[in-house]
C-alpha cells in the first residue's frame, strides 16, 4: 500500500510573532492539501519577554545561550504563549491542532550540548524522534504544532533549534509517510544576493551549495538551515523547499535536489 503524503512546515519566529503575518500564514497553512505538521520558532518573543523580566539574552552565532532563567522563559514562550496562540487560531479555522513539545509522548529526545568553547547551557542536540507515534497522531486527523523544546529523559527540558526540530520530525516521519519539508521565512528562498529578493536560486544541489558557501554567497543563518535540509534529504525526505511564508504551496522559492 503506497504511503500517504505529509507536509512538514517550519515557520520562523519573525512570522508567527506579527499578528497580520501570522493570520496570513495560518490561512496559507490551512490551504495546504493533505496531512501536515507545523513547527514554529519564537525567539523574538522570548527576547522581549526576557527583557521585561530583567533577564539578559545572549546569542552566539545565532544560537541562544540558555541558562536556567532563560530556560524558564523559552519554555513559557515557546511551549505556552506562541504554541497555544497558534493552536487556538488553527482551531478557529477548522484545523484540529494539537500543541506539543518533544517531551510530550516522548516524541523527541535530546542530550544537553557538551560544553566547548561556548557553554550554551540547556540547549539540546537531538538523539531521536518517534516518527511512529507522530504518524499515528497525524493519521487520526490531528495536526501537530511543534514547539522547539525537547527533553533528555531525566526530567530536563532543552531549548532546541526550530530548523533542527523540523528536519528531525521530517526524517522520523519518512519511513511512514512521503514527506515534503518546507522552511518558510521572510525571504523568497535561497538568494544569490541577500539584499535582492528577485535573485532566488530555483533549485540547489549539495555540490552547488558547498561552492556557494565557500564563496560566501550563502552565509549566516542560511547555513544551518541548508545543512539540516540536505541531511533530511539524505535520510529519506522526498522534497525540501525553502520559500517565503506567503507561499506555503511551494510554487516559488528554492527546491533542494
Image (spheres, rainbow, N blue to C red):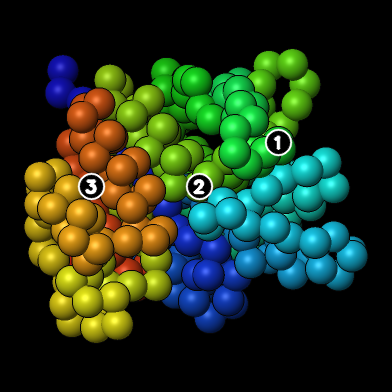
Instruction: Provide residue 188's location: percent of width, then percent of height.
Output: 27, 72
The quadrant where residue 237 appears: top left
In depth, the one of 74 and 83 nearer the eye is 74
Alpha carbon distance from label 1 to label 2: 15 Å
**Taking 54 as reference, is 45 left or right?**
left
Q: Earlier in the sequence, mark 3 or mark 1?
A: 1
Residue drawn 21% across the image and 35% down it: 233
The residue tagged 2 is 162
Looking at the rendered structure, the number of numbered marks drawn on it comes to 3
In the displayed orientation, state which residue is furthest to the front: 117
The residue tagged 1 is 122
- Specify the quadrant that holds the C terminus: top left
Query: Measured along the vertical axis of the image, is residue 66 above or below residue 128?
Result: below
The residue tagged 3 is 240
**Is disc 2 surrounded by few (<14), some (14 to 19) or many (20+) residues within 10 Å?**
many
**Taking 229 as reference, is 201 left or right?**
left
**Taking 174 as reference, is 134 left or right?**
right
Residue drawn 41% across the image and 32% down it: 168
Alpha carbon distance from label 2 to label 3: 16 Å
Query: Measured along the vertical axis of the image, is residue 104 above or below residue 208?
Result: above
- Specify the quadrant that holds the N terminus: top left
Q: What element carries label 2?
A: helix
Q: Which of marks 1 and 2 is nearer the N terminus?
A: 1
Residue drawn 19% across the image and 43% down it: 239
Q: Do the residues labelled 2 and 3 touch (CB within 8 Å)?
A: no
In depth, the one of 116 and 180 nearer the eye is 116
Instruction: Note whether residue 150 is visible.
Output: no
Instruction: Note whether residue 114 is visible.
Output: yes
Instruction: Provide residue 225's location: percent of width, then percent of height.
Output: 36, 50
**Is disc 1 surrounded by few (<14), some (14 to 19) or many (20+) residues within 10 Å?**
many
Q: Is mark 3 on a helix, strand or loop?
A: strand
Alpha carbon distance from label 3 to label 1: 29 Å
Amino acid at each position: 500500500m503506497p504511503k500517504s503524503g505529509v507536509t512538514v512546515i517550519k515557520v520562523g519566529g519573525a512570522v508567527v510573532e506579527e499578528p497580520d503575518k501570522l493570520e496570513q500564514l495560518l490561512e496559507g497553512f490551512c490551504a495546504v492539501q493533505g496531512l501536515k505538521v507545523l513547527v514554529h520558532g519564537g525567539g523574538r518573543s522570548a527576547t522581549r519577554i526576557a527583557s521585561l523580566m530583567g533577564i539578559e539574552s545572549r546569542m552566539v552565532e545565532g544560537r541562544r545561550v540558555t541558562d536556567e532563567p532563560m530556560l524558564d522563559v523559552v519554555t513559557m514562550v515557546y511551549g505556552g504563549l506562541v504554541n497555544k496562540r497558534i493552536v487556538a487560531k488553527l482551531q478557529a479555522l477548522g484545523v484540529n491542532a494539537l500543541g506539543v513539545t518533544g517531551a510530550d509522548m516522548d516524541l523527541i529526545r535530546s542530550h544537553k550540548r557538551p560544553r566547548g568553547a561556548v557553554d550554551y547551557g540547556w540547549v539540546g542536540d537531538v538523539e531521536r524522534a518517534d516518527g511512529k507515534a507522530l504518524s499515528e497522531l497525524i493519521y487520526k486527523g490531528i495536526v501537530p504544532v511543534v514547539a522547539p523544546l525537547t527533553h533528555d529523559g531525566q526530567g530536563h527540558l532543552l531549548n532546541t533549534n526550530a530548523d533542527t526540530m523540523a528536519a528531525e520530525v521530517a526524517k522520523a516521519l519518512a519511513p511512514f509517510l512521503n514527506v515534503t519539508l518546507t522552511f518558510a521565512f521572510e525571504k523568497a528562498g535561497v538568494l544569490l544576493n541577500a539584499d535582492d529578493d528577485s535573485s532566488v536560486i530555483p533549485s540547489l544541489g549539495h555540490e552547488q551549495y558547498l561552492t556557494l558557501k565557500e564563496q560566501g554567497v550563502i552565509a549566516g543563518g542560511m547555513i544551518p538551515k541548508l545543512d539540516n535540509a540536505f541531511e533530511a534529504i539524505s535520510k529519506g525526505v522526498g522534497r525540501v523547499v525553502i520559500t517565503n511564508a506567503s507561499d506555503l504551496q511551494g510554487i516559488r522559492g528554492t527546491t533542494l535536489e
